[in-house]
Amino acid sequence: MIHSVNITNFMAISSLENKEISPITILIGKNDTCKTAVLKLLYSVVKSLEIYSIQNEKEDTETLTQTIRNKIISVFSPNDNKIYSLINNNTDKCSITLEVEDIKQNKYRQSIVFHDVFNSSTNLHIESNVHYVPKNTLNSIFIPAKEVLTAFNDIQIMREQFFGKGFDDTYLDLINMLKIPTRLEGIDSSFLSITDDLSALLQGEIVQTTEAKDFFVFRRKGIKHDIRQTAEGIKKIGVLDTLIRNGRLRKGTILFIDEPENNLHPSAIRALVNMLMELSRQGVQIFISTHNYFVLKQFAVCAKRDKTDVVTWNMERDENDSVVATFSSMKDGILPDNDIVNESLSMFDDELQVMYSE
């Protein structure tokens, strides 16, 4: 789990610090306020530690440095792989510090500092107490805003033939996890019950197959349907279902979801939020970004109902055009003051004005 985060001068962010991160964090704000960038940054660092735990079973901070560098480049795809382009334009240095705890309660403090050197290259400096990470103790998943099942094969081809251009590592990592065969053995029963709810929501299920050129088909009432002709909302929920059934989404997972509401009916959004709350109860830490009122309102209702702390990070531009964040708890079921709610109220005011102007 991520316990704390401190980000300074990363892209448009001047400062973001949260010393006590909740089980569920929701990033809100207008377009171009670095919501997705924050999700990607947190994912990059945690995934680097996860990769390091698999690749290295001895102390090797140099390898960890390279792993972090490669992951940040592969996730953000800066021009010519120049990391310094991710530094805030008003400075020549940015820093990121995370405190992470793995499933065995080992704690890691990972600090990263980018230095812009002569505007031509970057010295990536790593400060860390991380010397060894036990294998299989960290697990992170990033689900991008665009669904991946239709472009499953295309993502792999683009990365292999065009040297990583077109789809960043959030897509590649996800399809590699989705390739893992599903199973019933070894999956916690509480997680399997969530897949039952997902199947009910889908009125069918996304299943892996070797019979078609695509890796997946949608099966409904015993009939298999081409994944390319399946609704995008169904495919997006099917990703969660597959990750549970192949054991990748499990207790201790840190789950990042960018705009989960995309292509979903409001009733499906509410059902999905309830399932995410259940995943949180089963030990999954969740970070999401959203522009959607239904997502925000349903989380507020669930937080009060379940007496669970769901915290929003409201990302806004200040007078200097830098992005800053304010934090609000929805444990009492109260929505924070933010542009999503304000725009809903503004639209209601417009409706009243039109109705009573006649």
Image (tube, helix red, strand yellow):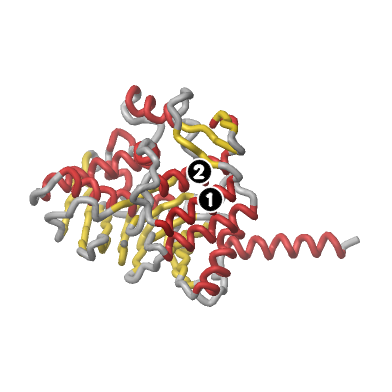
Q: CA distance from mark 1 to mark 2?
A: 8 Å
Residue 18 visible in the shown view: yes
Give the image quarter of residue 104. Answer: bottom left
- Image point 80% across, 64% down: which residue? 352
- Left or right: residue 357 compared with residue 52: right
289 vs 47, nearest the viewer: 47
How far across and down, in percent of the image, does residue 314 sit?
48, 64
Is residue 38 visible to us here? no
The kind of residue tagged 1 is: Leu
Q: Position of residue 145 (x, y in %)?
A: 49, 44
Label 2 CA crowd tier, 10 Å (few <14, some 14–19, many 20+): many
Q: Is residue 71 above or below residue 167?
A: below
Q: Residue at x 59, y 54 (%)?
A: 269
Residue 198's label in the rendered image is 1
Compared with 48, 214 (above or below) is above
Identify the residue at image location x=26%, y=52%.
92
Disc 2 secondary structure class: helix
Between 133 and 70, which is closer to the camera in this rendering?
133
- Residue receiving disc 2: 238
Residue 254 falls in image quadrant: bottom left
